[in-house]
Image (tube, grey):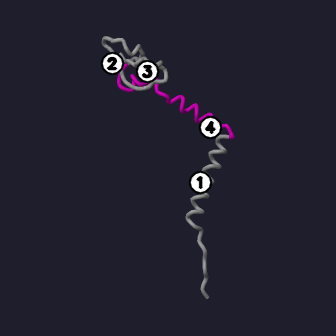
Amino acid sequence: MSKKSQSISINTIIIAALGLAVLVVLFVVFTGRFGKFGEGVRESSLTCEKGCKAVGYNQGFYRPNNREGAGETCIPGKYEDVPENNVCCCS
């Protein structure tokens, strides 16, 4: 007596996993928990003050990009609190 068995194909497993992931994302979006995720992202945004403190300075400020400053170190990058055509400087 020989028993024949069928196994589930790998394609079926992959499709089921993708379907489950989509359901989880939909659940998060429609239950309002996505807003808490957005708050965490906003809190982690880079400001000029945080950038200067990260490289060892006490204070961060911005000034127009075309003006020379004395005794300050300007660090490149895009910062949330620095307007366009300005640069973040540290002292």
Find the distance from the CA under tag 3 to the CA under tag 1: 42 Å
Up the image or down, 23 lies above or below 29; here it is below
Residue wearing tag 1: 18
Q: Is 2 contained in the magenta span?
A: no
> Is residue 43 toward the left or the right of residue 86 in the image?
right
Q: Is residue 19 left or right of residue 50?
A: right
The location of residue 66, given as percent across then percent down, is: 37, 14
What amino acid does circle 4 point to?
Phe
Disc 4: CA contacts within 10 A as few (<14), some (14-19) or many (>=20): some
- Neighbour class for label 2 at 10 Å: few (<14), some, many (≥20)? some
Q: Mark 3 points at which residue?
A: 49
Type of residue at label 3?
A: Glu
Q: Which mark is residue 34?
A: 4
Q: In this view, does 6 lie to the left or right of 79?
A: right
Give the spatial CA distance, label 2 vs label 1: 49 Å
Q: Is mark 2 on a helix, strand or loop?
A: strand
Please tell me which of labels 4 and 2 falls first in the chain. 4
The earlier-in-sequence mark between 3 and 2 is 3
Q: Which residue is found at the position 46% from the left and 19% from the top?
A: 84
x and y percentages locating residue 73 in the rendered image: 33, 18
Give me the residue at 65% from left, 49% from top: 23
Categorize mark 1 by other alpha carbons within 10 Å: few (<14), some (14-19), many (20+): few
* Position of residue 61 measured from the top left corner of the image (x, y, whole percent): 42, 16
**Label 2 sits on what residue type?**
Thr
Cβ–Cβ under 8 Å for marks 2 and 1: no
